[in-house]
Each structure stands twice: as structure tokens, then as C-alpha cells.
Amino acid sequence: MAHIVEDARRTATGPLVLHGLSVEGVNQCVHCGLCLASCPTFAELGTEMDSPRGRIFLIKALAEGRTALTDTTVQHLSLCLDCRACETVCPAGVPYGRLIEAAKAEIEHARPGSPARRLFRWLNFGLLLGRPWALRLAATALRLYQVSGLQALVRRSRLVRLLPGTLPAWEALLPSLPPRHERAPLPSYVMAEGARRARVALLTGCVQSVVFGAHNRATARVLAKNGCDVIVPEGQGCCGALNAHGGDHARALEMSRRTIETFEAARADAVIVNTSGCGAHMKGYGALLDGDPAWAERARRFAASVQDLSEFLAKAPLVPPLSPVALRVTYHDPCHVVHGQKIRKEPRQLLAQIPGLSVVDLVESDWCCGSAGIYNLTQPEMAGRLLERKIRHVLETGAEAVVTANPGCILQIQAGLRARGAEVQVLHLVELLDRAYGRPAERGP
Amino acid sequence: MATLTSGRKTALRRELEAIVGPGGVLSDPDELLVYESDGLTLFRALADFVVFPTSAEHVAAVVRLAGREGLPFVARGAGTGLSGGCLPAEGGLVISMMRMNRILEIDYENQLAVVEPGLVNLHLSWAVVPKGYYYAPDPSSQQACTLGGNIANNSGGPHTLKYGVTTNHVLGLEVVMPDGEIVWLGGRTRATPGYDLAGVFVGSEGTFGIATKIVVRILKKPQAVKTVLAVFDQVDHASAAVSAIIARGLVPAAVEMMDQLTIQAVEDAFGCGYPRDAAAALLVELDGLRVGMDAQTERIVQACRDAGAREVRTARDEAERALLWKGRKSAFGAFGRVSPAYMVMDGVIPRTKLPYVLRRVNEIVAAHGLRVGNVFHAGDGNLHPNILYDPRVPGAEARVVEAGAEIMKVCAEVGGSISGEHGIGLEKADFMPFIFSAADLAVMQRLKNAFNPTGLCNPGKVFPTKKSCVEVGPVAYTPHAIEAKGLAQRF
């Protein structure tokens, strides 16, 4: 019969760690279960190992040595989107994002997988994200693949189905790359127009700068219109968010130090980020580098200066004049904006200031679309289910465009709409603002 | 409970998969571990299987299989319960209802909905709110808890003061009986002829069978709502205000109280606007017709002032009201900010005894070297002392249980009850003799045996297990005192 068990292992003292990272936060979970219904994977599966509370339970059991890193445990922890929707509803304040990142780091450490998988991870996390030149080279190759007609051939001939593993899913998600001149780096300085409000530094991002250079240019223009001198620090690379989310803790640390160093030199009032995961991650640098005395203080100071573009712009009314944009749109909240940074009102406030724009509510607007960093590549089945759910809600709104604020979401939702043959655009919030400032729409990817 | 041999377990798994499909059975120890407790972590027990049916027929087949094998079984929803009610017996089956969560029908004209038990309480209101309707019972866990669990525990919530508890909102149920028979209890109208079997079933804590369809009432949203926050420097004054409000003949939709520790935890969680330095806060809500609402609100405000409130204000808009309620409804979880674990009690007392009982609660908990946060349905006299503890401290859990038992005794002594809405479950089974005689319990046991003669359906719950009383299975019947006097008949 069930009874109270004084479990000797539960009384073990000492901090709980996984892969050297503290998971003491598990003790904040009081098992109330309020998170369950807001977890996309739990909503889809109904199994508690795939809920936040269940995963916290598994992480705690792992750290306490009650259970081992078995195939099933790995499977359930890996199925987590790290969307952090649970953090938004958690009354106990469990730092779930940090817990799942520690767990993923432990998984990568203890179960690195086949040589092919390790090579693949190195290519992504080590080479592409770590070295801007490698990313540029890959972009050129991808552009060639696309403009040469090879991609069209592969897709038309269904050759793609012959690719092994999850590669066909990858191919479907490949962003269509803009020509070279649109991938050119931004000028290192863009001067404010009108009354000067602030000196800001812009993160151009890794994937963002290659695929969505247009968004970065629009960001600089909109900031300049709103009285900002925009510094674009040269030599900036990836902020390390993708690495941290993917369990590559060591490189993530390295990237965070490099990012701090690069941006400190810009001596800006604020560091502006127009992508979701990067902003949330950089705001967490303080916690990330907490254990490093040489960097802790610098990291905290830097983190405090990071702001999402919408968060920064919404602090004051948009500088006029704004011309009408006659469009019916709906807004999708990127997870790491709404849950990771608790920014919910600001993007909507900005949209409301655009004349002629009609904004309709999206059901489950703050639910993950399945993109979740590289989740749509590593967990294509669940990603597909969540995308399906997202597209269903988008189509219900009757909107002509989905507005969001993150490259991953844009690519994912575009792929979902394309698969449905739906004529709905997907725009970054800053593109709309840029358009309202009179800029003709740039060719999207 | 004999452990299953691995061969038998494999065979059973195969049979269960044949019923619910290959993705619908869990038997891996790492996965079962996650199901070892509900919202009350003090109690833990492992099942042999967790099964995910998607239809009443699945449930019936699983239950019949359990009967054939002599395995205990229990239904589970979101696992937010607070009395260990959905824990398995050591071994046996947990039947998760989470894949039966559809809304099957909404009939606005007759103000009812037909839903499956795995539907989240709040999701029903979300579905009907565009047409101006809602589902009234609102347990604090409503954003996650399921209607099936609400049925089992006859759940309440802040607004039960005016609107009643779950049973007042359930018209009928499709139930898989413990022997696998599928029956309908009640129907689609307010009164059905014969015994009120739906009424018997609601609150039976999963010991009478498993609901697979539920017909619930949906209500038109009230025309106007006013929410008043009254802040007190003394807990006794807040208690007095509660009695004063009711004594003035006002019927608020809700009267909730929070003490200082709770207020601080809630403010840490969501910054809802409760003053951190207050000894206690009352959240009073009025709803109904717009006409006269302001006058009624004024009388509430006056009652609070007369009782010694240092500040009384009305929520300015829906956003402020929603935030105040968010704080109140998240209070249990917010204790995670001040303690790694808690056990919430669920006593009911006459309202007038509030000052005395709250003092005793604080004394008892302090005497055990523990802390307590109080957040409760003051209008109903339904207390929720949350005893905070650290499970890593040896002996702490035993002290919590002792303190809890003493608090329950106090509630019983002042003429109250040991559960308002969380159910008896495992946690309070041994407290039943505080309010019921052996003869009372024997009559209840007979009722249970009528539904659940083998005792396999959620065993170990509700009835005391230790020395004090009877348990599972047919027992020798002794006449109840009122029967002996010829005032009631055997049935």
C-alpha cells in the first residue's frame, strides 16, 4: 500500500548537479501540476513524462541517482521543446529552462551517439555557428543549390525521399537564400534621424544575418527613424543560444564571453536583438557565467543591457510619420520572446500604432510552432504535429499575414503554409514597421 | 500486493496494447516513476502499468482485464489532486484519462455540454465563452485539472459560495462500472426519476467506477462583476469581516482569505498587487445584475471597514481583477518559492469559529517546528492550511503528518469536517473516525460494495486502513443506530 517513505537517497545532502550545472531548481517544484496544460508536448501526448512536472521529476531523479540515463529518459527529455511555456505559468518560479539545458548537456556528455551524429553536431555547433566565414560559405553553397535548379529538381523528382533519416525533413525546411548583395554585412554605423534618443548596438546573429539580412537592415532603419545611433559591432558571431539549447555547454560559454567582449567595445546604452532565442539567452548570461569570477560581473552588466527590439521600441510612442499598411494580420508569439523574456504586450502595442493595419487574435498565439531552435530537425514528428496545430489556428483567423519576431518561427510557419498551399505571408514585426516608415517590401527569403 | 513476474507482465502488456493500441501502455520503470504521486508528494506508490484509453469501450475492456487478473486499478486525470486519491495501490493499473479530452456536444439552448473526463476544467469555459457562457465550478487548479478529477472529488473552488460544488453542475454521466459494464447515471435534465445515482457517483473518489462521458451545466456569464480587495493588519479582523459580510445578508460569489506568508509567496510569483506587509487580505467578489451592484459593493466595503480593514479597494478593470485571481489561484504552487514542499489541509469549520481555529492551526504547526501558510475559501469556512516542510530533513514528513492530524481533530471538534473539496483519498482515510462512527463507516462501505464488490476499483482510499476500522471487501453487517431504532430501513 502507498505510504510515506523516508527515502535515504532523498536525504542526501549537497547541491544537485548534472554535467557540473546546478539543477537545485528542481526543489522549487512542489508538484502542483499547473504547468501541465500549457505544455505543448503534454497536450499532444497526454503522458506525464512529456510534461514539465514529469521532466523535472526525471531530472531530479537523475541528479539524485534514483534513475539512470536510460533510452526512455533520454527520449522524454529530448522531446522537450525548451519553449519555457511552463515558466510563464509556474507559481513556484522553477527555472525550467536552466534545468532542461543542464539535462541536455548531460545527455550529450554521457550519450554522444554515433560518429555520424557527433560529426554532424560538430559541423553545426562547432563549425557553422562558431565561425562566421564557415556560415557564409555554407550560405553560398546553399544559394548555388537553389539557383542552379538542383533543389527544384530534387524536390520535383522526389529524390529527396531517398535521403536517409531525418534529412528529407531538413531539406523541406531549407530557407530560400537571398542573393549575395542581400547577405552583405550591415554598415558598422547607422546614424539617428531626428532627435537623438539612444546609442544602441545591434546583434546581427548567425543564421539571421545570412538568411534574414533584410530584417537586420530593416531593424537598423527603424531604430534610426526612432532616434537611435545604431552600432553594428564587427566580428560579432553567434551568441551561443543554439549551442546551449542543444546541450553544447562548453562552446556556449566560449561564445558568450566572445559576444560580451565584442559588444562591450561598442559602449552602447542597449544591445538590441531581433531574434527570440538569442535575446532570451543573452539576458541569461549573468546566470550562465555566474560561476566564473572573472566574468560574472561583466556578464551580469551585459545581460542587463540586452533588450528585445519590441521591448525597446515600445518604451516610447513610435516616431511619426507612419503611413498606412492595409493588411489583416495576426501575431504569433515566439517562445523565447513571450516565455523566455515575458514580452507579450509590446509587439501588440507596436502593431496597434500602424495605421490601416487590422490585427486579429490568434488562438494559442503563445504556443510553440515546433521550430524551437533545431527541434524541427531533431524531432520532426512532434514538430510537425505542433506546426499542424499552429497552421490550423492561423488559417482560422483569415489573416493575410502572420507577424512574428524570430527567424526559426518564420521558416517553420512558412514551410507549414507552403505545404498547405495557403497564400499567407509570414513577416517579421520589423518588416511591417519598416513598411509603415515608407520602405517598399524587400524580397523575402 | 504480489509483484508480477516479468513473464506475466509482458503478457499483460501485450493484452493491454491489444485493447488501447501500442502507444497506449507504459510499463518502463522510469516512466512509471513519474506517476508515483499526484499533487501531494507525501505519498508515493508505483503502478505496474499506466494505460491510455481513448473510448469507454477501451476503459471497459481494461477494467474487465483487471478484474480477470485480480489487479487493482485507478483512474487518473492531470494528477493535480491533493489527497493522493489517484495513486495506484502498490502495483496494478493507472488508467490515464488524458487522451479522452474532447468536448462532444455543446447545447446552448439547454445550457449543457457533454464532455469527456480528461477535458481540462478551464478549457470548457474557454470553449463556451465566445457565446457568453462558462462552467461555474472553478477549483484553483482549473487551468490544469480535469473534469473527471472534479467529479471524483466533487471539487469546489472560490465561487462555490454562491454557485455550489461540482455535483450541483453535473446532470448525468456515462460510467464504466468496476465490473466493466457501461451504464448511464442521471441524464440531460435537472431531475431524473428514481435515485439520484449521478449524485451518489459524484464525490465517490474513483471508488464507484470510471466516468467516461459527463453532462454538465453551463451558465450564462453574469452581467456585472465587482471584486473587492480588503487589507487587514490583524487576521482576527479579517475573520470578523467574513462573518459580518454574511450576517448582513449579502451573498458574494466568493470570499477568499490569504495570510501574510501566502501573500508574500504570491507577490514573489506574479506581483499581483497584494500588499506584502498585510497580516491578511480578503478577496470578495460580487456578481449578478448590474442594477444594484454598486450599492451591494458599498455594503461589502463598509462591512470590511467596520471590521477594521486598513485599506479596501475595488479592482478597476478586468485586467486587475484577473491578476488578483491569478495570485489567489496560484497560491499553492507559489509556496514553492518559500519551501521545497508543502502539504495542504482541507478542513471545514463553521465560519464563526475562524478566529479560534486559525489561532490553533498556527499553534499546532509552530509546536511541530514547522511553518504554515493559510489561503482559503473563508466564506465557506473551508480552510487550507499549507504546512511547509523540507522533505530532505529526516523526520520532517512524519511531523507534518502529525500536525495535519491535530488540525483535522480541531476542525472536527468545532463541528466541522475533514474535507471540503480535496477528497479523503489516502491522506485523510485514517481521519474518517474523527467524524464518523464505525456504524457510519459500515453503511458507507455497503454502498461502496454495491458499486465495487471486488474492491479492485481504487482500493485503499476513503476508508481507514489501520486497526481503527474495516476495509475492502464484503464485511459483516451491523445495524446502524438509526436502523436499530427503526428510523431507517436496510436496503
Image: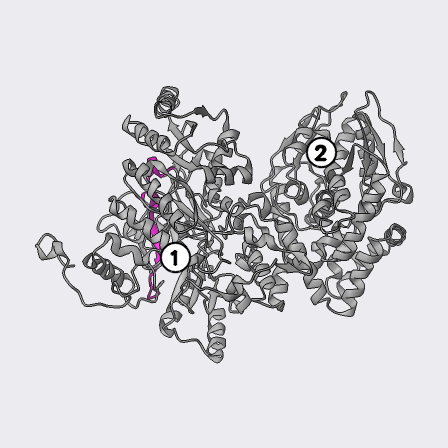
Q: Is residue A258 visible?
A: yes
B56 vs A207, left or right, is left
Q: Which quadrant does the N terminus of chain A fall into?
A: bottom left
Chain on which label 2 sits: A
- Seen at 59% across and 66% down, the residue is A65
In the rendered structure, which segment of residues is drawn in magenta? B159-180
Side of B485 where A63 appears, left or right: right
Establish if A390 lies above or below A166: above
User: Which element carries disc 1, helix, strand or loop?
Assistant: loop
Q: Is any atom of residue A82 visible in this view? A: no
Residue A310 numbered mark, or none = 2
Q: Quadrant of residue A317?
A: top right
Residue A135 percent location from the top left of the image: 86, 52
**Residue at the limit of the structure toward the left, as seen here:** B486
Q: Please say whether residue B173 is one of the residues in the magenta stretch.
A: yes
Which residue is at 54% across, 69% downward?
A: B28
Q: Which residue is mark 1?
A: B85
Query: What amino acid type is highlighted by mark number 1?
Result: Gly
Disc 2 secondary structure class = helix
Which one is closest to the eye, mark 1 or mark 2? 1
Q: How many marks?
A: 2
Nearest the eye: A239 or B360: B360
